[in-house]
Every structure is written in C-alpha cells, then in structure tokens.
Image: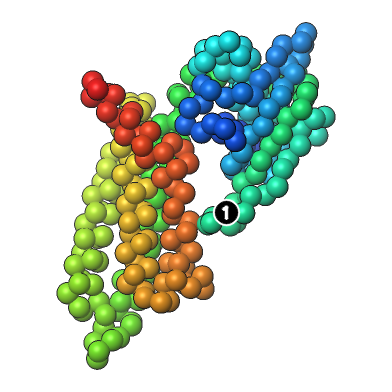
Amino acid sequence: QARWLPGIASGELITAVAMTEPGIGSDLASMSTTALRDGDTYILNGSKTFITNGILSDLVIVACKTDPTQRHAGMSLIVVETGMEGFVRGRNLDKLGMHSQDTAELFFSDVRVPVENRIGDEGQGFKLLVKNLPQERLSIAMAGVAHARAILNWTTEYCNERTAFGQKIGSFQNSRFKLAEMQTEITIAESFIDKSVLALNEGTLTAEEAAMSKWWCTELQKKVADICVQLHGGYGYMNEYAVGRAYTDARVTSIYGGTTEIMKEIIGKSMGF
C-alpha cells in the first residue's frame, strides 16, 4: 500500500486489471496464465487480451494460476510493473467504439515477479475479484444510465429543432411516444441506481443487485442509443454527431465487466435455480 496507493490516488500511477485471455472470457477458472513459485519470486507465463489501460498502465494486476491443478482455488493476483523483463505489450486494439480508451494485448514470458507483489494470500485471487466485482458492475450501470440520459437530451433538442413536413419532428406521435418511453425507462433506472448506490455506501450491496443494475442499465443504454440514432435519421449515422459515436460506444457495455448473460445467471442462481 505504501509503495503504490499514493501514486494511484494522485493519478501518477495508471493501473490495469488483466483477467481475460484469448481463449477465455467469462470462465475465468479456465485461465492458462500461470505464476509458479521459485524462491522469492514467481515466474509468470501467459497472455491477456482486451485489457483496458494495457498500453498506458504502470502497474498491471494479473489474474493467474499459482496452482494450475485447481480452478478458482488456484487463482492469485500478481502485480507486474512496467519494465519487468519478459513483459511485452501488444498492439492497441482497433475497436468499434470507445476510441479514446486504449485496449491492449499483454504477453508474459518468464517474467520474474517478487512474491511481495502478490495481492492478498496465494489462492485468494478469485475471492478478491468477486468481492470487488459488484462495485465495478454498479459503476458500469451508473455510466450506462448517465450515457442514456445524455443521448436522450441530445435527441430531445434535435427533435425540437429539426422540421419535416412543416412541423418539428418531435411533434409526430411516433416521435413523442419514443421520447416518452425513453424518458420513463431512464427515470426508473435512475431510481434503481440510487437505491443500489445507497446499498453500496451502507455495505449491503449484493452481487445480485449489482447484476440487475448492470444488465438492465447497459441494455437500456444500447436501446436508447439505437432509437435516438433512428430519430436523427441520416445524421445519426455520421460520426460528427455525438449520437452516432455514442451508439458505437454503447455496444460493448453489455459485454465488459460481465456479460448480460452472466448477470442473468447470477440473478437466476440467487432465486434458487
């Protein structure tokens, strides 16, 4: 904590969390990246992909197997520092959206990492990730609702300015109904987000509640973006309009941080199924 937290808090140190691999996404327990103990170091081998901040990061928290014979119980978290021999960053991936955010491949070839760079106890990596995932998923949900609200605001303004057949396009019943539906759904989502944030602050946010927030709000974000592109007509398909860029940015939100399908699995299991 003394080594890194001050720099992380000040923004001087950029971090990344590396979980996903080329061959595994949601099934983390099947990861093949290993960190085998050798005296006072771990020897890290493997690769990661779709890593946010992978290019710019100073510290990479790598989820890996310190005991390859185990699934969840064999996972640990190891911090790899920039400049460690054998640590190579791949290309900055060319994404459909979110172009301002770097997303990279990372490669580890016999990287010697001090044992002191391990976060928590050996074999506790999965538990640490699960403990913090609800907060991450809630933050994605919050961003999704805020994004949807912004898109609706842009579109409402556009519908008040754009005319067709001698009247504002917002005055057509189809447009009014679409705008009214989005206004209602976003407002309801905001209320649920407020409830979830209060639960987080009180330490009572459950994995199920975070999963509900995450899948519903990101799917709503995509739905709103799609409807609003349609209401903008041809202009909505142009990158010079924010709504078009928002459409491509929104698509990934129901994938990262846990897919919509995994969120529904979490909720369904909590119901006894």
The local crowd at label 1, few if under 14, some if 14 to 19, many if 20 or more residues have their Cα within 10 Å, is some
The answer to which of 45 and 58 lies nearer the viewer is: 45
- Looking at the image, residue 60 sits to the left or right of residue 245; the answer is right
How far across and how far down the image is residue 35, in percent?
Answer: 68, 18
How far across and how far down the image is residue 193, in percent?
Answer: 31, 43
- Colouring style: rainbow
Q: Residue at x 26, y 83 (%)?
A: 168
- From the image, which quarter does the C terminus lie in? top left
Note whether 146 is above or below 54 in the view shown: below
Q: Where is residue 265, by image quadrant?
A: top left
- Looking at the image, residue 80 sits to the left or right of residue 189; the answer is right
Q: Is residue 157 visible?
A: no
Amino acid type assigned to the residue bearing label 1 in the image: Lys
Q: Residue at x 60, y 56 (%)?
A: 100
Note whether 83 is above or below 45 in the view shown: below
Q: Residue furthest bottom?
A: 166
Q: Is residue 174 visible?
A: yes
The answer to which of 9 and 112 lies nearer the viewer is: 112
Q: Residue at x 61, y 23 (%)?
A: 32
Note whether 257 is above or below 250 in the view shown: above
Which residue is denoted by mark 1 in the rendering?
95
